[in-house]
Image (spheres, rainbow, N blue to C red):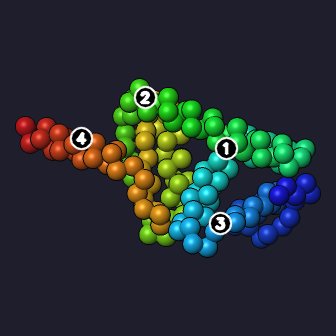
Amino acid sequence: MTVQNSVDYDSLDGNPVYLCFMIAAPQDDGNIHLQALAKLSTLLMNEDFRNELINAKSIEHFIKIIDQEEAKKEVQEKKITKKEEYRVLAVTACPTGIAHTFMVAENLTKAGGEMGYPLKAETNGADGAKMYKQLKKLKIVMELLLQLLKM
């Protein structure tokens, strides 16, 4: 939902709220609501995306903006994955990690890219780890580094 005139929710940063979301999920579908929250939190870190949502003229336009942003993220992810250009693997973890685990992963990925170090962030939140293959690669890299340090 977009609130054109904003709402004051006494947020920690003192900023007014323009976007409100409700996540509905089947009761017996595990952690799908956590996955939706994590994906939404990550997408909302993009200021341009947030502004587009705030300025959406209809519900259909609002949904289209979300779909387009998700598709753009998937293309970016596949592009890097196909080239296997990651130089850094980060692990973000929190036992109750829902949104923050994924937000940290997004910030690390963005900062790595800005510094010229393509980065893949493994998220290990309340819903568990998502990229075990990357963790196996990290183990191999760490073993190589340890061998090099012993030389």
Q: Please, what is the three-letter code of the amino acid marked with disc 2?
A: Lys
Residue at the image point whose x is 19% and y is 41% from the top: 145
Residue 46, numbered label: 1
Pointer 2 and pointer 4: residues touching (CB < 8 Å)? no
Instruction: Please report the residue visible at 42 percent of the width from the left and 53 percent of the height from the top.
Output: 130
Furthest residue in direction left, as rendered: 151
Which one is in front in this view, the residue at disc 2 or the one at disc 4? 2
- 3D distance between C-alphas at marks 2 and 4: 19 Å
Amino acid type assigned to the residue bearing label 4 in the image: Val
The disc, 4 or 3, on the residue closer to the chain's N-terminal end is 3
Give the Cα distance between marks 2 and 1: 24 Å
Mark 1 residue crowding within 10 angstroms, few (<14) / some (14–19) / many (20+): few
Callout 3: SS: loop
Sequence order check: which comes first, mark 4 or mark 1? Answer: 1
Q: On the image, numbered disc 4 is attached to which residue?
A: 141
Q: Residue at label 3?
A: 25
Q: Earlier in the sequence, mark 2 or mark 1?
A: 1
Residue 82's disc is 2
In the rendered view, does 141 fall on the left or right side of 112? left
Could you say where residue 78 lies in the image, as x and y percent from the top left?
Answer: 50, 33
Tell me the SS state at disc 2: helix
Labels 3 & 1 near each other (Cβ < 8 A): no
Q: CA distance from mark 4 to mark 1?
A: 32 Å
Instruction: Please identify the quarter of the rendering in which residue 16 is found.
Output: bottom right
Q: Are marks 4 and 1 in contact (CB under 8 Å)?
A: no
